Structure formats: structure tokens, C-alpha cells
Image (tube, helix red, strand yellow):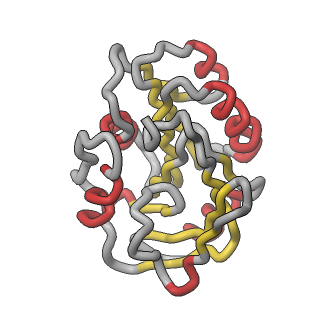
Amino acid sequence: MKLSIITPYYNALNFTTELANKLIPQLTDEVEWIIIDDGCHEKELNKFSKKVLHLAQNRGCAGLPRNIGLDAAQGEYITFIDADDLVADNFVETILNKIKTSTFDYCLMNWERLDKLFHTNVKKGRPAWNCSVWGIVYKKTLINSHRFNDKRIAEDYDFNNEVLGGTQEIITDFLYFYRLNKHGITYR
């Protein structure tokens, strides 16, 4: 297995259905998509993926479900997609091509907001203010035993400070599309 995609999920079925419509056609035998249902018992998710993990109770943050995804991941590389975001039609293909043609510990990709009012070009590296784990492909050995803390927001900041290092690569395509979701955990 080359790539594991981890998505923490909480009450975002409409958005996740839109994501699934983009992502599922891209999945191959080299890629797994792991969705971690954070205690909302959403059975509709079972139709989206080969691997859906339903947690008995809500953990109150994205980090702990991500940890469960990390423990279940079989891929040599890991990337994260939030349940309310989207990816490009060539998301998986572009990442797999980078994995097959480069040697890296982590790889950054360009991303933009869905409303196109803001974008980040990582050509010069990762902006210091951007702490998100989405938009990055991690070599699993880089993550090793590091896990997310239980902070409600910015848990990815601490995670990235612990794991990001080594050889960096860049994908200049805009592959990830962030949704400014006023009902998401950042705004609650």
C-alpha cells in the first residue's frame, strides 16, 4: 500500500458526499481512504470507503480520530483530508507520481479556499502561519509514533512541529481545496 488518506468525520455528510464523489473514482489498489466517524454513528459513510471506523463517542477534536486513523493506516505515505474540504480530480494520481519519482520525508502541495478568495503557493516552502496537516504528504516513518494531542483546535500545529523535518518536496499543482465552514470545529 503506497498511500493512506485519513479523514476525521463529524456531522458533515453533505460535504463528505461531495468529497467522496471526487475522491472515490481516484482510488486504486495502492491507496486506502480511512474515515473515522467521531461518535455520530453515520451509517451512510459505509458506502464511501473500504475502511470506516465508527467511534462509540465523540472525542471533541479532530486529533484523536486522526490518531486512530494513523494506527489503522497501511500506506507508506499518509495524507489528511478534512471531511468538509475537497480535492482536485488528479489528487491521488499526482501524489502517487510524486511518491514514485521522488524521495522525500514530506511533500507540500498548493491549496486554495473553495471560494477562491485565498490561496497558498508553497513554491518557497510552507508559510509559518499555516499549521494544517492537510496539504502535506508524510512518509509514515517520519510520523513514527508521534500522535496528535487532544486540543480542540490547532492540534496540527504541535503535530507538525514534532514531525516535519528531513527531505522536502513540493507539488506545485493546486490539489487541495479548503472550505471555510462556519459550522466546523474551528468556529464552534
**Residue that appears at 65% across and 27% down:** 48
> Which residue occupies the foreground of this view, 149 or 34?
149
> Which residue occupies the foreground of this view, 103 or 92?
92
Image quadrant holding the C terminus, namely: top left
Q: Quadrant of residue 177?
A: bottom right
**Residue that appears at 60% across and 76% down:** 121
Can residue 25 be seen here? The reply is: yes
> Residue 181 appears at what percent x and percent y?
58, 41
Q: How many marks?
A: 0
In the displayed structure, would residue 48 be above or below residue 92? Answer: above
**Residue that appears at 48% across and 13% down:** 41
Q: Is residue 146 left or right of residue 110?
A: left
> Residue 12 appears at what percent x and percent y?
58, 28
> Residue 141 appears at what percent x and percent y?
32, 60
**Residue that appears at 43% across and 56% down:** 133
> Which residue occupies the foreground of this view, 74 or 58?
58
In the displayed structure, would residue 137 be above or below residue 146? Answer: below
Q: Quadrant of residue 161?
A: bottom left
> Residue 182 appears at what percent x and percent y?
56, 39
Q: Residue furthest bottom?
A: 124
In the displayed structure, would residue 48 be above or below residue 106? Answer: above
In the displayed structure, would residue 47 be above or below residue 8? Answer: above
Can residue 1 be seen here? The reply is: no
